Image: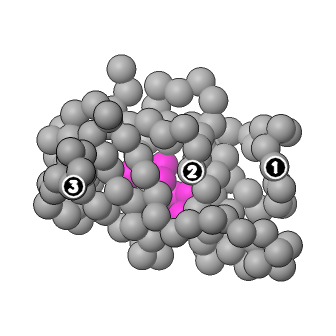
Amino acid sequence: MALFYTESLTIGYSDVQAAKKWWLATFDCKETSVPSNWDNSLPSDVALKLPGNDEPAVLLCNQTEVDRAGLDLGYRHALIFCSNLKKAHEHFQLRNIAAGPIQESGGTQFFEIRDPEGNVIEVCKEP
C-alpha cells in the first residue's frame, strides 16, 4: 500500500515548474497528462500521480493563469492522507523537509509541512 494518498488536490503556484520538481522529489510523484474530463484545464496545468495510484490526484496550476481565467481554487490548505504517520514524518525528515510536530485535533493525528511557496500541506493519519 502506498504511503500517501488523496482524492483530489489543486494548488496554485507562481512557478509551476519549480513546484513540480518539489512534488516529484518530496512525494515521489509521477507526471502524467491532465485528464480531459477535469474541469477548467489551463495550458500550464501539471497533473501528478502519487505512488501506488493509477490516476492523477494532484493538479498544480499557474496562479496567474487561474486569476486571469477568473477561477477560484477554493482553498489554500491541502490535505494528504497516510497510513503510517510516524513513517510519513520520517519520510520528510530524510528529504530535509521541515515537518511540524505530530498533533491531534478532533480525534485525528496530523502534522504540517510547507512547500517552497509557503502553502500548508497537512499530512493526516487515514481515518
Residue 108 x/y as whole percent: 24, 45
Query: Which residue has dot 2 on it?
Result: 9
Tell me how many marks there are.
Answer: 3
- Viewer can see residue 32: yes
Quarter of the picture holding the N terminus: top left
Whole-angstrom CA distance, mark 3 to mark 1, is: 33 Å
SS at badge 2: strand
The quarter holding residue 3 reads top left
What's drawn in magenta, residue-wise?
18-26
Determine contact: label 3, label 1, CB under 8 Å: no
SS at badge 3: strand
Task: Point out the tag, 3 or 1, that comes first from the N-terminus.
Answer: 1
Residue plotted at (28% across, 61% down): 112
Query: Which residue has dot 3 on it?
Result: 105
The quarter holding residue 35 reads top right
Residue plotted at (21% across, 45% down): 107
- Viewer can see residue 94: no
Say which amino acid is labelled 3. Ser
Task: Point out the tag, 1 or 2, that comes first from the N-terminus.
Answer: 2
Residue 80 x/y as whole percent: 41, 46
Say which amino acid is labelled 2. Leu
Query: Which residue has dot 1 on it?
Result: 39
Q: Which of marks 3 and 1 is in front?
A: 3
Q: Tell me, yes or no, whether the highlighted magenta stretch contains residue 120.
A: no
Say which amino acid is labelled 1. Asp
**In the drawing, does residue 32 fall left or right of residue 123?**
right
Q: Which of marks 3 and 2 is in front?
A: 3
Q: Name the outermost residue toward the top.
A: 1
Say few, some or many: other residues with alpha carbon within 10 Å of mark 1 (under 14 / 14 to 19 / 20 or more).
few
